[in-house]
Image (cartoon, rainbow, N blue to C red):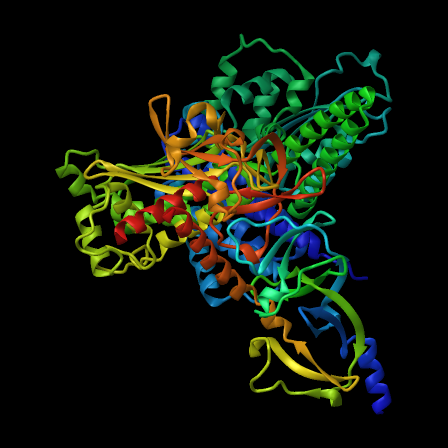
Amino acid sequence: MDMIESHTAHANNNNRYLFVCIGHDNFGIPIGSVKEVIEYTDTTMIPMCSTVIKGVINVRGSVIPVLDIQNRLSLKKTLDYDRYSCIVLYEFIDEVIGETVTVGMLVNSVVSIEYIIDDHLESSPSFGSNIPRQYVWKMAKLHNRLTTLLDMSKVLDINEINALLKTSQDIFFTDYCKL
Amino acid sequence: MSIDLSAAVSTFVSESKELLQDMEDGLLELETSLIDEQKSEVINSIFRAIHTIKGSAGIFGFTRIVDLTHLVETTLDEIRLGTITLDNRLISALLSSRDVIETLVVLSAQESEVDSHTKNKAKDLAAIFNDYLDDPHSHAMPSEIQPTTQAPHNRANNTLWHIFFIPNENVYRNGLDPFAFINFLSKEVIDLHVNTYTKTLNTTDMFDPESNYLSFHLCFASNKSESEIADIFDFIKTEAIIKILAPKAHFPDLKAACYEFGDVADILNMLRNTNSIDDTVLKAIADNKDYIQDPEPTQSTAGSPSITHTKLHQSKTLRVEALKLDRLIDQVGEMVITGARTNLLAHETGNETLIEAMALLERLVENIRDSSLKLRMVQIGETFNKFKRVVRDISQELGKEVELTIEGADTELDKTFVEKVSDPLMHIIRNAIDHGIEPPHVRLANNKSVPGHLKLKAYHDSGSIVIEISDDGCGLDKAKILKRATEKGLISAEQSLPDKEINLLIFAPGFTTAENITNISGRGVGMDVVKRNIESLRGSVEVESEPGVGSTILIRLPLTLSIIDGFMFSVHNDNYVIPLDTVVECLELHEVVAEQDIQDKSYINLRTEVLPFIRLRALFGIEERIAHTRESLVIVQFGTLRAGLVVDSLKGEFQTVVKPLGRLFEGLKCISGATILGSGDVAIILDVSALIKSAIAVYETLEFKQ
């Protein structure tokens, strides 16, 4: 019985995670919503925008925003992006407008795809994590190491990022006018 | 055997809604003073609309709709014939029947149960119509509304139908039996009298047993329409002369028929026997012996005026699903992008013939782009016409008299705009009637004409569409607005504002000067909706008002959302596009101003005019500077605002397919979208007006703090 259940879960991508390297650490992203991984290309900067947004790229005729995940997770120790860097296209449904939204996440590199059974999931530490706690969904035990699984609905909270962008735009204007 | 009718039903719903709108327009038109000829034309068109709905509803078996439309149709038919006079009460009843039919159509299509409210309404309406239909003395005097220009006394007063049916000699040889038609007619009508006579058989020695010499005069009662009767004889009409005279036919027609189709005395005898025509009329016919006949068979079949009208009014439009159109526009957008890319590659090869061919292709693509964008353009008239009803209803409710004038109904704008602009217009019009236009006694006291005037006007103005709503009411009460705004904490008491901004306070959420909340306005929600809707379309709203004279609200909208003619420039390796029609001119910065003159200030003296400018490099937070001699100045204008943008280099005109940036960037004031360049790179489209307005706002708040 257990076998069958885990098998279907496996097929549904339910317990599979894409592990990526962000800064100096690995993080897991549920693979079901990952549309594709593309190589890091130059992005077009959006003027007067917070550093959370790296820019926008053209993916087969659609303009997709790309998030600088190191900045989004407010990592203190960051790494420059290089030829191993990738853009993970993450697809989800925006509850407000009821449409699918694709957002790109710029990560330092892609590590592996792993299957993690529920028994190997631990709750997140109450403190001490290097990223804000709301972004952590669970900790996964993998090869005897603890790896953070990201809560993507929080990391890619459109309303929150949008508010962030608006404040940073206001700052740009004020800075300019003060000159 | 189940057929999926859902598609057909949805067509029925949209078609019915359109027809009902036509009907409403027509009824409102009837309220205005029209000459009789126009009136009968309008009534005919309303009749056709309701008849079509009845027919379609019958196909789907929506009996409730059929019942009501049938009654409306009968009433209209009587109006058409002149037995019922069309008064205001009847127009109101017809208007509300239009609403009930619409509700019924929607409910029937959803297969949901009709609520008791609608049922009662339908019942009330039925009572009103029956009241009119039963009115006994309406038959005595025909109303002024007649389908033709004939004066009422020219009517022959026949109460029954008369048909002259004269089959030609060869009718049997051609396999047709006139008697079969008469036999069929006898089943369709009541009290059929047939008079047979011969007209062509003069001498017996010429008799040909295979020829037909008989002519018929048919007289009967029926409530069918003329076209329905004509249809019965449809098959034989090429082989016979058929003259149909409806009840109350024109006297000259009847007279002509009598002379045309045989011996007058015989025919008059036959007519007398039917007891349907006054003796005076028959005598008049008999006395007109010098009438010259002109037997033209083609004339005889053209009996029904309504048939010819129907043919004239079939519109030449094609119904296309909106989604298909959107997809086409998307694909054209892709084609424009790919075309630009191909063009770029062609130029790289340096192959002259290829470049020439590409230029030709580019031009074709541009044409296709323009014509496919036009497909989405609709005239604003339809939206405007909807408000005739609104104005009528609200002004009646408030006991005010309002005349609505519409100008520029043929101005075209994007379909998406039409849908989104309708709501704001509704709010503005409600407010104008409720707050703007005074009651009749106040208007009289102020030396104004009793009916208030409301004007809806649309026109194109420098790359945007302007919709103007103006009234000649009391104007905005600035003192009252300021008082309310201070109470609400929108402004501080000591703040002094220019008039334009005081007027704009009416758009603040929750703002109202109304003491009482009515069901028309006063909650302070409407105008807020107006502003937000218009801004979501990248438009703007302005208010002009003069106390005692009236107010005007100007809505400015961009022409289209999806493809624009853009102007491209670059700042720090990134490309930016602004709408081409906002660009006034481009200059080399060092040619108009020396570097040391703009060290610490952001304006220049351009041909003795002060022009403030924004240095985009600095605004975008790019620290690295470039040489003054390499900088360019783009002068942009939006409405009355004029300013300069200092950029790195100019790239020129560019056909821009606007790609939305999504909700992540929603509400960012200066960025209105992105576009993909021929090289595959992305360029950001800047909203020039927002950019300048934001800069002004920030400067002002900074000054305020100091």
- How far across and how far down the image is residue B515, in percent? 21, 58
Name the residue furthest left.
B445
Residue at 66%, 66% in the rendered image = A92
Q: In this picture, is A111 found above or below B377?
A: below
Query: Quadrant of residue B36 in the image?
Result: top left
Q: In this picture, is B90 found above or below B301?
A: below
- How far across and how far down the image is residue B564, in percent? 58, 36
Is B109 situated left or right of B435 in this image?
A: right
Most foreground residue, A116 or B325: A116
Most foreground residue, B80 or B492: B492
Number of numbered labels in the structure image: 0
Most foreground residue, A8 or B636: B636
Asked whether residue B89 is in view, the answer is no
Q: In this picture, is B485 found above or below B392?
A: below
Name the residue furthest bottom.
A1
- How far across and how far down the image is residue B560, in percent? 55, 38
Query: Quadrant of residue B39 in the image?
Result: top left
Residue at 33%, 22% in the rendered image = B608
Residue at 58%, 72% in the rendered image = A154
Is A13 situated left or right of B86 in this image?
A: right
Asked whether residue A91 is in view, the answer is yes
Is B687 situated left or right of B395 in this image?
A: right
Quadrant position of the N terminus of chain B in the picture: bottom right
- How far across and how far down the image is residue B466, in percent? 43, 35
Q: In this picture, is B350 found above or below A92?
A: above
